[in-house]
Structure formats: structure tokens, C-alpha cells
Image (spheres, rainbow, N blue to C red):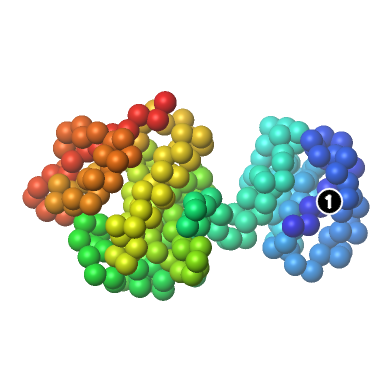
Amino acid sequence: MIIIIDEASAKLASFYYHDEIFKPQWRRAVEMTSAPADCIWIVSNRQQKQIADSLGIASVGEPQCGTRYAVESLAELDIEYLERVRRRYNHIPWDIGETDRCLIRELSLSDLPALYELYDKPGMTDFVEPLYDYETELEYQKAYIESMYGFYEYGMWLVFSKETGKLIGRAGLEHNEMGYMIAPEFQNLGYATEVCRFIVDYARKNTDFEELYCRIDEKNVASVRLAKRLGFVRNGQIGNERNTGGLDRYVLSIR
């Protein structure tokens, strides 16, 4: 990541003395920029923001600069935040975290073929809605990335095997509801438990939710067993759009 910064914004940034990381002369840095997706600009005025927009460079600044990613104070910035902004601006999925055997990250539109392959596996849509046709799903995921990931900074993520790099499941948060699915060949091996424990811990550290809940069909014995293993307790029923029956509601306090 190339961070473009000028003297005015550098004096306000918390990492001012890490000047070996930055291109301090912004005009020269822009002239040298050949890969806008690798750059993020800490702007100090609207002129710089407008130049950054024209070059396709992500920018961060204080509210008066008019940036999409505005911060109350540049002293709040750190490298991790800037990298996440650069990725969001350039439609690069965020890495959410990892467990012993899995990598968890946001969905990218390029993941759709692998997602269809996952959903086509035996039993995968017994208890969850199938995907739409490709064009409809593509538009849905574009909006999902923008509204859920982009606004809330969480959502349903993808789960990859560290060993093979292949997509093996999907899990995450939609507000305070936790959802999960694991490919049949990885079921009954502890993968779902491993990933869901990560998500519970993530919610505890990164959200202000008081509790998480899951909606589980009573016929989905494996998910009921997993929820109980994680500490969820049954708390009544809620409606089910898929059939005339209801779904059991399982709740876990995380505070």
C-alpha cells in the first residue's frame, strides 16, 4: 500500500514520524502513481479529494474535505483502517480472520462460480434458501457488498480451507443473527464449531450486540446440536417462509 500524505495532514496523523512509509510530496507522488488501487490518500483539503477521485484513488480525510471515508480526527487513523478503506474503495474483499483450519473473508463477485458449486452439493439447500439465477444473484451480491459489508462492516462471509484454498462453507452475521453452512464432506469434523466460535468471539469484540440468535428447523438435528454446543438455548419459535412449520429460535448472550 502506498500512502500519499502532505505536510499539513502528516502533522495531524498519529503516524507522523513513520515517514518512511509515506510519499510526503503529494504532487510528485500522484505523478508517479501507476497503480491507483495500491494507493490511499490522506487528504487535507477538497482539492486533493477531487484529484484523488479523478485518479481513482481512495481518500480519507476530516469531514470538511468531503471524503466518503471521513474521520473526526486524523489522529484516529492506523494502517489497518487505511488498508480496509483502500480495499473497500477498490472492491477488494476484506480478510475477516482465521481459525486453525479455515480462512474467513468477505465475498467477492469473482467467488460466485465457487458459491454455486458449494450450493449444488447434496443437502446444502435442505434448510437454507437456494441461490437465485446467475444474473439475479450477481445483482443481489453487488447490492449486498455495498449495503451490508460497506455500511455495517459485517455480513455473511465465505469460509475457505487453509489446506486447499477451496471454498468449504459460508458463515457470518446479519445484524445479530448468526448463520452457517459447511460442505457435506467437511461436516462432522468440527469445522462448523470452529468457525462459529470465531464468529461469536468476533461479535463480542466488534459489535454492541447483547445477544446472538439462530433460526433452526427442528429437523436440522446437526445444527441444533451445534447451537447447543456453542451455548445457545431455545427461546420459542419464529415464522418460516419455506414451509408451513416454524423455526426454533436459539439465543446466546454475549455480554
* Residue under the image location 89 percent in, 56 percent down: 27
Give x and y (percent) for residue 35.
Answer: 75, 67
- Front-most of residues 247 and 224: 224
Toward the top, the furthest residue is 255
* Residue under the image location 56 percent in, 54 percent down: 94
The reply, left or right, for residue 136 in relation to residue 244 is right
Give x and y (percent) for residue 169.
Answer: 38, 60
The reply, left or right, for residue 101 in relation to residue 49 is left
Looking at the rendering, which quadrant does residue 174 occupy?
top left
* Residue under the image location 46 percent in, 69 percent down: 166
Can residue 199 be seen? yes
- Front-most of residues 123 and 67: 123
Quadrant housing the C terminus? top left
Disc 1: CA contacts within 10 A as few (<14), some (14-19) or many (>=20): some
The residue indicated by pointer 1 is 21
Toward the left, the furthest residue is 244
Can residue 131 be seen? no
Toward the front, the furthest residue is 189
- Front-most of residues 3 and 227: 227
The reply, left or right, for residue 232 in relation to residue 78 is left
What secondary structure is found at the residue carrying circle 1? helix
User: In the rendered image of this protein, does residue 123 appear above or below residue 143?
Assistant: below
Give x and y (percent) for residue 242.
Answer: 16, 54
Quadrant housing the N terminus? bottom right
Q: How many marks?
A: 1
Callout 1 amino acid: Ile
Give x and y (percent) for residue 32.
Answer: 86, 65
* Residue under the image location 81 percent in, 64 percent down: 33
- Front-most of residues 65 and 143: 143
